[in-house]
Image (cartoon, rainbow, N blue to C red):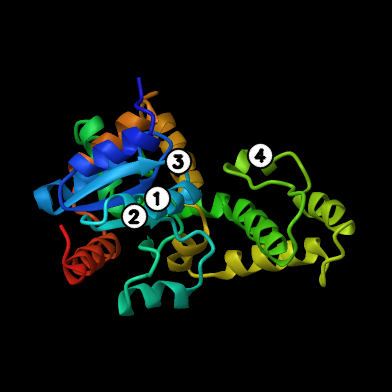
Amino acid sequence: MKQSHLRGGALLAECAAGRGAIVIVEGEHREDDEYFYNHWFGALGPQISFFAQNGWERVVEAVAELRPQLPHRPVFGIIDRDFADESRLLAQYQHPPTDGIYRLTRYTLENYLLEPNGWHAVIDTLTRGNPPGGWTSPAEVAAQIDAAYRRCIVLAAWNRTVHDELTRQSGQSIGFRDHPAALAHVDPAQQLATWGRSRDPPHPLYEVFAEHRIRLERAEPTQWPIEITGKAVLKVLLRQLQLATSQIPFETLCTWYLHLHPTPHPEIAAVINAILDAAARRGIS
C-alpha cells in the first residue's frame, strides 16, 4: 500500500528530524518523486533530505510554512517546469530564488525517466537478451520514445492552449488532460472553440490550438521533453513495453529502470547542486 504524503505537524516533525537541506518535491505518494530523488541522491547522506507533497501548489505552500518554523534549517522545493519560460530557469542558477522554489528544465520529472539506454537495459534484462522487434537496441528504443512523444502532441497543444487562456483570463476551465486517450474520440479544436466563445479571446482558441499542434509536430524531438508532459509519454511508452513483453506493472518497470540506469540526468544534478550551494551560503544546517 502506498504511503500518502505528510501534512501539518507530521510533515514538520519529519522535516525537523531529517538531515541536511530539506527539499520538498512533488508526488501524490512518497513512492513517486520522493522515491526517485532518494534513489538518485541517497549517497549524499546527511547533506539533503526529500519529502513529498501532492502538486506544485502544495510544494510552494509547504516551503513557505516550514521556513519560519525551522529557521535553523535550509528548506527548498523542486517543482516541474510545466509552462515556465527559459528566463525563469536561468535566473535560479544566477541567484537563489527568494521563495526557495527551483524548477526542472524539462516539463516534468517523468521526462527524465525516458532515456533509451535505460529502457533498452530493462527490456534486455526482462527478455534475457532476446528483446522483441522494435526494442533490440538503444536506437530502436529511442524511436519508440519519440513515437510516444508524438502520440502526446495533441494533448500538449490542448494543455498549452488551456493554460495560456486561463493565464490571460481566469474563470471556469475546460480542464487539462493527462493522457492522449482523453482526446482520442473528440474534436479538440471544436471543444476549445465552444469554450472560447464565452471568453472572447483575442484569437480563436481552435486557431491557437492548431498553431501549437503544428509547431510541435515540426519541432525537433529534443524540444518535446520541454513542452510535452513526461507523465503521459511514460504511460504510453510503458503500455507499448507491456505489449511487447508481458503485463508487468508500470511501477515495477520503473523500478527496474532506476536500478539499471541509476545515474540522474545532469539537469537534475544541477538543480540539487544549486540547492546545496544555496544552503551553504545561507550558513544554516
Q: CA distance from mark 2 to mark 4?
A: 42 Å
Residue 239 falls left or right of residue 203: left
CB under 8 Å between callouts 2 and 3?
Answer: no
Look at mark 1 in the image and give the residue it sits on: 65
Query: Picture coordinates of residue 233 (x, y %)?
Result: 48, 47
The first of marks 3 and 1 along the sequence is 3
Give the quarter of the image for residue 278: bottom left
Name which residue type carries label 2: Pro
The residue sitting at 52% across, 57% down in the picture is 228
Q: Secondary structure at mark 2?
A: helix
Look at mark 3 in the image and give the residue it sits on: 54
The residue sitting at 50% across, 50% down in the picture is 57
In this rendering, the label closer to the viewer, 2 or 3: 2
Q: Residues within 10 Å of mark 1 (few under 14, many from 20)?
A: some
CB under 8 Å between callouts 3 and 1?
Answer: no
The residue sitting at 34% across, 27% down in the picture is 3
Query: Picture coordinates of residue 145 (x, y %)?
Result: 42, 51
Name which residue type carries label 3: Asn
Q: CA distance from mark 3 to mark 1?
A: 15 Å
Q: CA distance from mark 1 to mark 4?
A: 36 Å
Name which residue type carries label 1: Glu
Q: Is residue 211 above or below residue 146?
A: below
In this rendering, the label closer to the viewer, 2 or 4: 2
Q: Residues within 10 Å of mark 2 (few under 14, many from 20)?
A: few
Q: Is residue 62 above or below residue 284?
A: above
Give the quarter of the image for residue 12: top left
The answer to whether residue 257 of the structure is visible from this angle is: no
In this rendering, the label closer to the viewer, 1 or 4: 1
Q: Which label belongs to residue 182?
A: 4
Q: Secondary structure at mark 4?
A: helix
